[in-house]
Image (tube, rainbow, N blue to C red):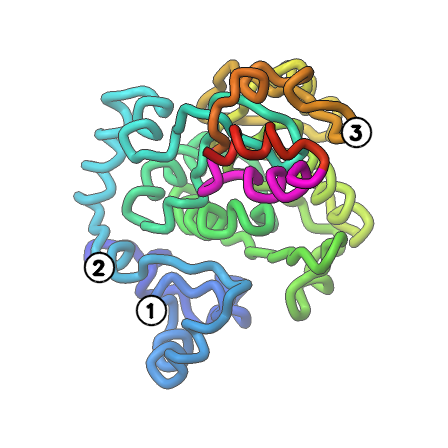
Amino acid sequence: MDDIDDRGIEAIGECAEHNAVDCDFVLGGLCEHCSVWKQKDQKRCEKMENFTKIDTENLMSLSVRDQQVYRATLNRMSVWDYLVQCGVALDGHFVFTGGGHGNVYVNIRDLNNALVLSPLAMQMAWEVREERIDAIVGTPHGADTLAVLVTYYYTQFTTWTPQILKPLKKGNKLVWYKDHGTRVQGAQILQIEDVVNSAGSLCEAAEFIRDSGGLPLGFFTVCNRLSDKNPGLEALQQKLDVKYAYALTEVKAENYSVDLMKDPSEQCPHCAAGEQINMRVGHGTKFLVQIKGKYPDLYKKLKG
């Protein structure tokens, strides 16, 4: 990485002491301390389930030339086509986080490979380069890796070095990882999301940030799924009461509300047609468990 400048991966300094990325979110070789820590405590690093998992080897192999090549790849095709090519834009019968059903699912959290995520993160960082950002927050379980990469590229395009603040989901509420809650006070924060459906996760995180004394400036998502529950970025911006809202791509997709007190086949055409539910991504398995006793015939059809 000799071709990265003095704000690049090899030369950030003593992470937390210099307001750079925390050791726990190390991209690999961020500073002497991070490198030594990973080498001496590799087993611990592998077991930290709540921490961002990044393909360090691939990220460290990204020279400036590599970055230009991968960004050019994204420029040659739409973001949506790129997601399809990466195998994370899927067709089928899916159950979303909010309980709705639909035929399109974008599973960006499967892209743990930093090399594949980098063009997306680079484009996101470029779009917000003129915004003064003190900290970047990734939505728990979905945008951790993406938030780390956006932060890195943002430091390449600006003179600012924002912190990465990590919220964790504990039961039904959000809590800050370690002492991150003490760093939120007064910070202007960009929220990073992989996919927005009804914006429930974004709203929860924005409220949590405000309650902690931070200022949510706006959010950036890779894909905004338009539906009756999500009419577009302008409406989401007003809903979250933030300065700006960005999306790399928007796609019109179904989102049928399903009330389990009623027969799902009367509410969702995919259930009515007996289309098998995808249990690999989304919340299909949970949905099947919920209907198994009450609608056994439908359960058998949807399970396949």
The residue at the point 73 percent across, 42 percent down is: 204
The residue at the point 55 percent across, 51 percent down is: 141
The residue identified by callout 2 is 1
Q: Nearer the viewer, residue 73 or 9?
A: 73
Locate the C terminus and report the quarter of the image it occupies: top left
Write down the region rendered in magenta: 278-293
The residue identified by callout 1 is 29
- Whether residue 125 sits left or right of residue 178 in the image: it is left
- Return the disc, 3 or 2, that comes first in the chain's sequence: 2
The residue identified by callout 3 is 261
Q: Is residue 85 positioned above or below 191 on the image?
A: above
- Return the disc, 1 or 2, that comes first in the chain's sequence: 2
The type of residue carrying mark 2 is Met
Label 3 crowd (10 A; few <14 / some 14-19 / many >=20): few
Residue 162 place in picture, x, y as percent = 54, 52
**Is 225 colored magenta in this rendering?**
no
- Whether residue 263 sits left or right of residue 219 in the image: it is right
